[in-house]
Every structure is written in C-alpha cells, then in structure tokens.
Amino acid sequence: MGKSTNLDNTHKIIYKKEKNLDDFLTQSEITKLEKINQKFIKKIIMIFSTFIKSDIKLNFHTVKINSYTNDDKNFHYLYSNLIKIKPLERKSFIFFSPNLLSTFIDFLFGGKGNTINKIDIKKEITYSEDFVNKKIVEFIIDTYCKSCKDFFYIDIKFLNFNIIDLKKNFFSTNNPFITNYFDFNLNGIKIFLSILIPLSTIKQKNKKILTSLDTNISLKSTIFKENIFIEHVYEIELDVIAELIISSIPKYKFDNLREGDVLLIEDPEKVIVHIEKKPVFLGKHKIFDEKSIIFLEKFLH
C-alpha cells in the first residue's frame, strides 16, 4: 500500500504497508484490497454520518496480518462480532473500539459525545448497546459485501455479539486473517473498527468465487462457462426461455403447414426451461391468479 490517496476534499486515506504483508499477499491482491477498502470507506462514512446525524471523518486506515487493532498493546478488551464469510464458510470477526457504541448512542439521543472518552468495557452488554451494535454491523456487512462485488464474491452473515479478551490469542497460524483497520474522528472523538477477512478468501481458493478484476468478459456470459452457482451471484439478470414440449410430426405434415393449422402436443402443460441456451429444468405451465406461471418439477444436470 505505502501511499496516500485523497478520496475527496474532506477524507484522506493512508495505507501503511506492514513489512510482512508481502509474505501473504501478491501485489495484485494488495491492489484489490485497496480498491475494496476505498469503496467501503466512501460508503460507510456517508451511512454513519446519516445514522447519527453528524459528520464523521476518516483519520487513517491500515492493513495487517493477524491483529485486532492498529496497536493491540493499547487494549485489553474489545467488542467482538462473530461473523461467517461465504462461500468458504470461514468464521471471522468485526471489532469495535471500547467507546464506539457509547459514542454512537450518545449522538443518537441528541448528545455530542463531549463527555465520552475511552470507556472501559463492562462485562455485561446493555440492551441499547446490543441494539445499536446490530444496526452498525448490518451497515458494515452490507457495505463491505457491496464493495467487494466488483472483485470477488463474498457474503457475510452475523452470528453473535460478545466481549473478547485480547490477551487470549485465538488466531490460528493455519488460518491467518487480513485485518482491515479503520480509524475515524467524530466531533474530536477517536473511534475505530476492524474487519477481519480470512486470507483464504482473498486468495480465492474456492472455484465458486467470482473474479472480474482483470477481465472484460461480461458477467452474464461467464455464469455457466465458469461453473459458478447461480446462488452465489447477485444482481444478475438471466434470460429464462420456456418452451412447450411438443410431439413429433411427419415431415410431409410439416411441409404442408399453413397459417391457422393446429398442432397436437403430448401434454399442453409440460415445458422445458433454458438459460444461456442450456436446458435447466422441466416444469408445468399453469394459469394462476390470471398470470401465466411455471411450476418447477425437475432440474436437468
């Protein structure tokens, strides 16, 4: 990363490349992360600012390997959100600074956060903290997944909210994490969040992951050629062609067909559906609620 990029007139992002980052990622993968995080920062700042009705600015951003924050030594406990990342089904985390939830809650109730400093995390999570946490995580998950879609497929599901003891190291050397750390300023108050992504997701070892960084091939035309499951792709329109299954007729009858002639078919209800000129499933054609519909009966492999 090792460079500064002005996103606009008010937000500045500084990439600090760790010495050991190149041991895990290629330059193209690092570039991909830069682009993803740039998109994420632009969107999440607008979302957070709208949510709490106050301006929020980015101080700086770093990417590390197997860390929780930008400086783990300064913290003992953090708010931890356990998440699951598809399609590799990896569990990971989204961490918040100890004062993030209290600061957001103060702003939501009309405060300016003037009395909020670095608050020690209590053992029990309040109802307000749990409610606001889920809302913030929802924003983060939706924004990060959308920021990734131009580079590879990722789907994140929230699992649970807890408090984690940073002194108990649970990182596995067999499953390293990329730590995306974001440091923000809200009315002079420093808050941060960290999004951890398993290295295996960035490496794209799963063939079902959709990559499009260095290709000009249209997404629609690669769906079946690359054997990507339809359930792993979003916001894609597919042309579905439903054809009636008709019986065979002698050629001489076909040659003598005229406008207005009637063809007998084996079963007027049965249809076969094609996508990208390939048969996908068999079904039955029905009229339901004054609409023409197809009931799926059998998928064709």
Image (cartoon, helix red, strand yellow):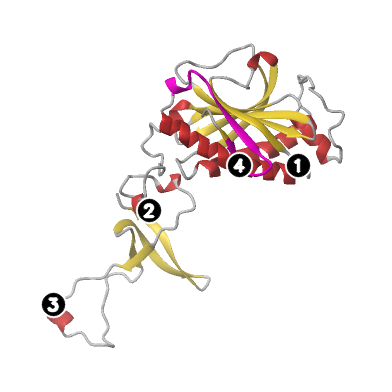
Question: In the rendered image, which quarter is residue 44 located in?
Answer: top right
Q: Residue at x 44, y 32 (%)?
A: 29
The CA distance from mark 3 to mark 4 is: 68 Å
Front position among marks 4 and 2: 4
Q: Residue at x 70, y 18 (%)?
A: 77
Q: Nearer the viewer, residue 7 or 281?
A: 7
* Badge 4 element: loop
Front position among marks 4 and 1: 4
Q: Residue at x 83, y 33 (%)?
A: 113
Front position among marks 3 and 1: 1
Question: In the rendered image, which quarter is residue 190 located in?
Answer: top right
Amino acid found under the numbered disc labelled 3: Lys
Circle 2 residue: 218
Amino acid found under the numbered disc labelled 2: Ser
The CA distance from mark 2 to mark 1 is: 38 Å
Amino acid found under the numbered disc labelled 4: Leu
The CA distance from mark 4 to mark 1 is: 16 Å
Label placed on residue 251: 3
Specify the segment rendered in magenta.
5-24
Q: Is tag 3's residue or tag 4's residue first in the polypeptide sequence?
A: 4
What x and y, as percent, mark residue 111?
86, 37
